[in-house]
Image (spheres, rainbow, N blue to C red):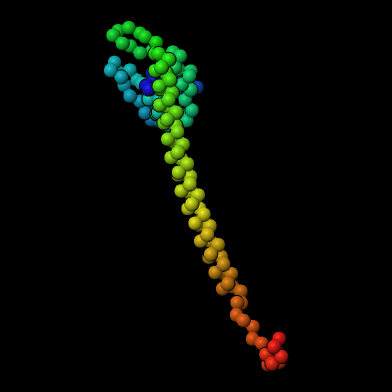
Amino acid sequence: MKLNKSRAAKAVGITRATLDRHIKENKLSIEKNGRGHVVIDVSELERVYDKVDIDTVSNNVQIKQNNTKDTVSYDAVVKVKDELIEHLTKEIERERKRTESVQERLDDEQKERRRATEQLTALLTDQREKKRGFWSRLLGR
């Protein structure tokens, strides 16, 4: 879903001036529609601002069909929300896998450090058997 600058600013809870500044600073990618107006994809807003409140925007979203304005149907809004949920679910799964990978690496590094510590401890402490004296050997002590 693509939003104009006003709706995009409203969806992420910032002012239009702030949004314009972020666009000027190239923090946010934009596109232009057929009329040359700036539009911003919701996924781009999510990338930059993390939280996008589609409910704020969805009540006012309108599309043009054959030069008439029709309010987007409830089904279309539900479809967009479902797609957004699916996208976020995939993103969460990717992050979970990445986190598991990092945790595995950290566990491996910790095991390696323990092994190295044990080796160094063995080298630094006298691990040789103590020699028993003549009488200890004779008496079996």
The answer to whether 132 appears left or right of 63 in the picture is right
Q: Position of residue 59 (x, y in %)?
A: 45, 14
Asked if 134 appears above or below 38 in the picture, the reply is below
Q: Residue at x 49, y 56 (%)?
A: 108
- Inspect this view and state whether residue 16 appears: no
Q: Residue at x 42, y 35 (%)?
A: 90
Image quadrant where residue 2 sits: top left
Asked if 44 appears above or below 63 in the picture, the reply is below
Which sits in the foreground, 67 or 73? 73
Q: Position of residue 65 (x, y in %)?
A: 31, 11
Q: Residue at x 56, y 69 (%)?
A: 120
Image quadrant where residue 134 sits: bottom right
Q: Position of residue 58 (x, y in %)?
A: 44, 17
The answer to whether 41 appears left or right of 121 in the picture is left
Q: Residue at x 66, y 87 (%)?
A: 132
- Inspect this view and state whether residue 91 appears: yes
Which sits in the foreground, 138 or 20? 138
Asked if 140 appears above or below 102 in the picture, the reply is below
Image quadrant where residue 122 sits: bottom right
Q: Quadrant of the C terminus?
A: bottom right
Which sits in the foreground, 108 or 120? 108
Q: Position of residue 126 (x, y in %)?
A: 61, 77
